[in-house]
Image (cartoon, rainbow, N blue to C red):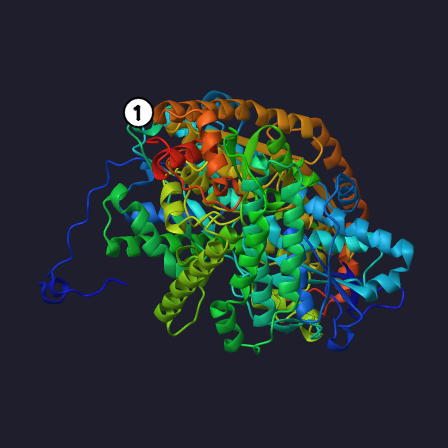
Amino acid sequence: MPFPTLRTWFEKKPSVEPPRKDRSHLRVGIAKVLNVWSTHQFWVGFLKELGISSENIVFSSDTSEEQGREFGKGRGTVDCCYPVKCISGHYGELVFGQKRNINILLSPMIHSLPSILHGHVVDTVTCTRVMAGPESIKAGFLKESDIFAENKILYASPFVSLGDRHMVTQQLFTSLKNIFDLDMEETARAVKAGFDALDNFTAKARQQSRDILTWCAENGKPCILVLARPYHMDPGIGHEIEGELQAHGYPILWLQYLPGDDDLVNWLFEEDVKTGRIKSPFDISDVWTSSYSSNTNEIMWGAKFATRCPWITCVVRLSSYECGMDQPTYTPAQKIVEATGTLYFKFGDLDSTKPGGGIKIRVETIVHYLSKYSAEIIQRKLNCLSPDCPLVGARRSDPAVST
Amino acid sequence: MAQLTTIGQLPLNQPPVHHYTAYRPRPFKREEREKVTILYGGLTWKHERLVQGAMHNMKYNAEPLPNIARDDLDAGKELIDVGACCPTIFTTGSLVNFLKKEVAASSKEEVANKYVFLTAGACGPCRFGQYHESYSMALDGLGLRDFRMFLLAQDELDQGPSGGGGLEINLPLSLGLIWGILFGDLLTDLEYMTRPYEVNPGQTDKVLQASVEYLYGVFRERPDHGAKYGTLAWHLLTNYFTRALREVRKMWDAIEVDRVRVKAKVKITGEFWLQTHEGERNYNIKRWLEQEDAEVVAPPVAVWLHYLLHPTIRKLEHRHSTSKHPRIEEALLHALERIYRWTYNRFRNALAGLPNELPDQEELRELAEPFYHFELRGGEGHMLIGKALHAYHHKKAHMICELSPYSCMPNTMSIGSMANVIGKYPDLLYAPIEVKGDSEVHALSRCQMILTEAKRRAQDQFDEVLKKTGLSAEKIRKYEERHPEVRRATYKVPHRGYSGTAANYVIHLAEDRGLARA
């Protein structure tokens, strides 16, 4: 909080709001990587409020091997998981691959994330590699000469705790004031606009997931939950495995946008809360005690949700090669899901190359199991829940479950 | 370890649902204390023995796990999920092998009742905070569900009785453990600065062993001064510990050293567990470096504790704080940090100021800032870069050897950022060594390539100093004969702007002791 000085006490208050700074000429490139996949709406809302038009906010393309070869070659500094390693290609594309050059390359170091589990877990921080990725990747663009400066680009990598909203204005003001010529008030306005945009988007996405579950409940149909990190939505990282499954007619849910409405989660976790196993439907301490990492926490909660939700008859786990955060969760997540007989399939060690043939064979296997066992799984899980389903009032005696 | 609970009202023909439940140890009760042995590990044998002294002093039966061996890697891999980092695999394997041996000698039930395992818990994003998941999975695999494992938070000195009251993490125990660790660091510094120059091979190790045993007794006999402020005040102000360290110094007086031997000074940095270890889990790299004519600057655990304590670093951790007096808390934290450094320096001074000073955390932060943001937590955070640049700017070492476990998440990031550092400081000698546990030749040969250049620089510096001072080896030897005190291990050679011990020694004799004018 700024300390009031004589100048600010006696300064004449402006009779009208000062004119907005003209930033319409600025073109901002954002590397579409890591947790930008779940927070992009914040950055768009933030920049638009600062006066940067939509057409001047440029996201890099989806990850691809071609992108890495063309723009990231020779820029790698360390061997690590692909979701971090591929950032070199994204930076390179924003620097070298634009028809109209960008002025600012924005690649936030996101320290904590907004989460549906906030307040129910120890913390919501991000993976240490994901958080520090921009520092490691920028080294590849600075080690010999300053590639950003040579291309007249300002590199901005704010350290920001999006899971701790009270800190964000100060953090972004401190790190971006010289880049965008910011003052504190407009930063606060832009942060609010960013969170409004993010919250609206998230609420809509969760409602869509609920609509899918409602449709499944009404029609006795199964659906699939993807248990993965946000950046597995990137076709170059998750290799569109969920798309292959959807092509067989199975609706897909992502854990990041599972509905968290009270009526639904209270129904699913009613027995657990009643028996004292957990304090609230969002409590994961029964299965995961080190609940520091936001995405890991949500994976564990997603697994719990899936094992209880009747119409999620199959969970597909995606995990990238050398993912240190996923590694300790493999067995617990599988055991959580399989407790109710829910099908569980893991695609592990995903890397840059899409194992097309392997995916196809496994998708066929998954589809076979789904068609064979979904009806039984739905019925079995309905049997474990109270008859008052908030989705459509589905009952354990409901007749048809078709696949 | 999965325990199973049943929920749901099911029809008779449907099997009950057993939901997965995370491992929770059964209580370790106060009345069990005399019959139960607390297992711990993860540090050097010196630290562990001194920690044992502090635990024995508090009437706990305590025993360190055997030093990590190559077999532990295989045992760990067998029982935990694939893709774990090598510290996780090694430490899990170490516990597994110990328990297997004990089970073979008695029974599972007896082992589960006889031992509990105490390990560090950590907050934050690194996998270090989730090691216990691997341990519990291994216990499951061994069929030792009833074995008890407890986490020790690193940032709370007074956690009260936990898990049944058998283990009480109170101030006297915490201070004993911390003091034990600091003493382990001080002895380690003495060891590594003496052994490469010892005239009688093996003497340093013998004196070190005797010093550790003596200090073990000092910790075991530590007087009781209450549970709270009395014990804190006593630990900070007593001369009980400094007196003991002066006794240790007398033991080290007996070691004769030859500091004219030219050695490349190699600072070890890296992931906490790997850099601290002395043994097979890091290819015995510290001993190997000494065999290759290097003087090792070992990383003290005290720097890590200082990092955890540093107010600037801790600020982010207080973001959910509901304290009504945050400024007072911050002021207290600043005071605590100063007291910590003062205490460490007090101990150093009792050993003739020989052990290395703790680096200034603010300076480390500023040095690393252009390359790695200080609030990026996990592992050693910005410290890896800060320490490398600190050694470079202050000429504390000829080269940096960074030990990084395979698939270590924070370390890979700072190694990546070091590419930028090397771009700016191309003459900084930096050897990042990835340790998998089973690729020794590759790792050591990589280190040797950089070490060759470091040795050349050490020799060049020494030759330059001889030329500058006009001294020769013969002249120095004659002076040493007349002044044997300079050949004692406890004789402090001040840092005179050179990285190497031999160069600093010569210029010290020449300029401070007047040998050049003689």
Q: Quadrant of residue A65?
A: top right
Instruction: Look at the image and tell me in which quarter the N terminus of chain A lies.
Output: bottom left
Image position, residue B396 (x, y; %): 44, 38
Furthest-front residue in view? Answer: B482
Residue B382 in sight: yes
Left or right: where B342 falls relative to A336: left
Q: Residue at x 73, y 49 (%)?
A: B92
Q: Residue at x 44, y 56 (%)?
A: B345
**Where is A373 relative to A379, above or below?**
above
Image position, residue B28 (x, y; %): 74, 71
Circle 1 marks a residue in which chain?
A
Count up the numbered dots: 1
| Residue type for callout 1 | Glu
Residue that badge 1 annotates: A150
Left or right: where A278 falls relative to A41: right
Q: Residue at x 15, y 54 (%)?
A: A18
Image position, residue B458 (x, y; %): 47, 27
Q: Quadrant of residue A234?
A: top right
Left or right: where B175 falls relative to A384: left
